[in-house]
Image (cartoon, grey):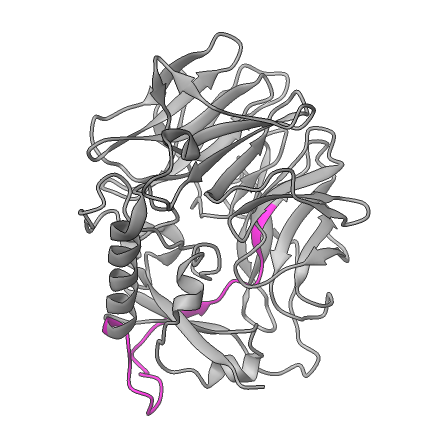
Amino acid sequence: MELEPWGICIGRGHEWPSAARHGHGCVAQSSPAPSFDEISEMRYIALTYREASDARDWVGSSKRIAGIRQEPSMLSRENSIGRRPPVAHGWRSGLLWTLWLMFSAVSCARSPTGPDPSIPISPLLVDFSQAWSHDGRLIAFRRPYASNYGPPGIYVISALGGTPRWLAPASLNSPGDLQFSPDDRRLVGTDNLQLVIFDVQTGARSIPLYTNSGVYYPSWAPDGHTIAYYRVSFDPFAPADSSFIHTLDLTTSTDTPLVVGGQHLIGFYLHYAPDGRLAFVQNLPPAHDRLAILDSRTGTLAPALDTGTLQDYVNLQWIWRLGTANVSLIFTRRIAPGGSWMVSPNGSSLRRFAHPWDLYDVVSPDGSQFVTQGQDPLTHVGILDVENIDDLSGASRRHLTSFSTSSGSGSLLLLSSRP
């Protein structure tokens, strides 16, 4: 089968703790999902327009692609790389995004004569978009490669480890943004920019609504019938309600934009707390973001952390220590001072998180452990590890998944270089 090559640069090394030692980087892929041997033959980046519409969830170095957030005429250095989808509407956003992608692909091209021995390498992730069930028993993840577990797909595995169960098909870039329902019977996620729900037992798939806008960051509310998500319209003539944060009531099939103080909300990394508060990274024009909390009971919106500048917060989640008053938000900031942080919901007690906090990492429901990226000891690819949050020695760290191919040979590598 002839493969259609594509790829993209992953940006500056300081943007992620896991990539800090790798410097600038590129990753080469192909579609459909390549074999290990095919990946090892790829030496330079090529880009296809086909993937440009949703090139946001496959990058193995815990990166995601973004476009322009606030102004369609502005493609700033800070906003050009990351997971966030375009906020701007219309052809100007799409044109600038495509030009940036093409420039990135060309600037990262390397000689096909062979790898540079001076280039550091790190494992390419094979497991993505993990989610931890509310009862603590299951962890879901996407594996877009055929392996010892079976075909590419969404898998669920016991939090204690073991053999995972294949749930539904998956590709390199979707489904993503997985979260369990409060009763742990379903998974919500995004697939090809649409909202999708999977039955955890049968794998049955449903699409609760269809929209011409792109859907991102769904989070299931504790009431069990409300899903909040961020949507962005690519139609320059679409009404304002076609974008911004929305809520979907699964009982009535009613979709409603969230409006506070007469303003629609732009927000990423939506995450409900057990008490119903919705935390998210709120973007404010022209170049300002903050951690915000919306209390659904009172309809009030309050900042949890606001420096008044762009900090590029990512992977915002709650750490909810059951039976204690120890409730925090965890996140990574990609602008200096950078790194992984925790803060109380009222904005007090800002402190460093003792571990790297990567794009797909997820906290256990009791706040004692987290799933992060590890490395398979045999194939050296990036798999899933579990570690205790309070363990500073790493003694509690264990492999949750493993990876091997039927042939037992080959490897997937992320090649880091300076463009």
Reply above or below: 131 against 304: below
Corner quadrant of residue 88: top left
Residue 405 visible in the current orientation? yes
Q: Is residue 336 magenta?
A: no
Reply above or below: 351 against 232: above
Q: Position of residue 280 (x, y in %)?
A: 43, 29
Magenta residues span 107-130
Q: Position of residue 157 (x, y in %)?
A: 73, 50
Reply above or below: 159 against 149: above
Corner quadrant of residue 283: top left
Residue shown at 74% from the left, 29% from the top:
183
Which quadrant does the N terminus fall into? bottom right
Corner quadrant of residue 338: top left
Q: Position of residue 358 (x, y in %)?
A: 44, 48
Q: Is residue 108 magenta?
A: yes
Residue 316 visible in the current orientation? no
Residue shown at 33% from the left, 88% from the top:
112
Residue farthest top in this picture = 298
Residue farthest bottom in this picture = 113
Which quadrant does the C terminus fall into? bottom left
Residue farthest right in this picture = 202
Residue shown at 53% from the left, 86% from the top:
2
Which of 151/262 is in front? 262
Q: Position of residue 346 (x, y in %)?
A: 39, 15
354 relative to 391 in the view: left or right: left
Which of 398/98 is in front? 98
Reply above or below: 68 against 149: above
Prevalent SS, magenta region: loop
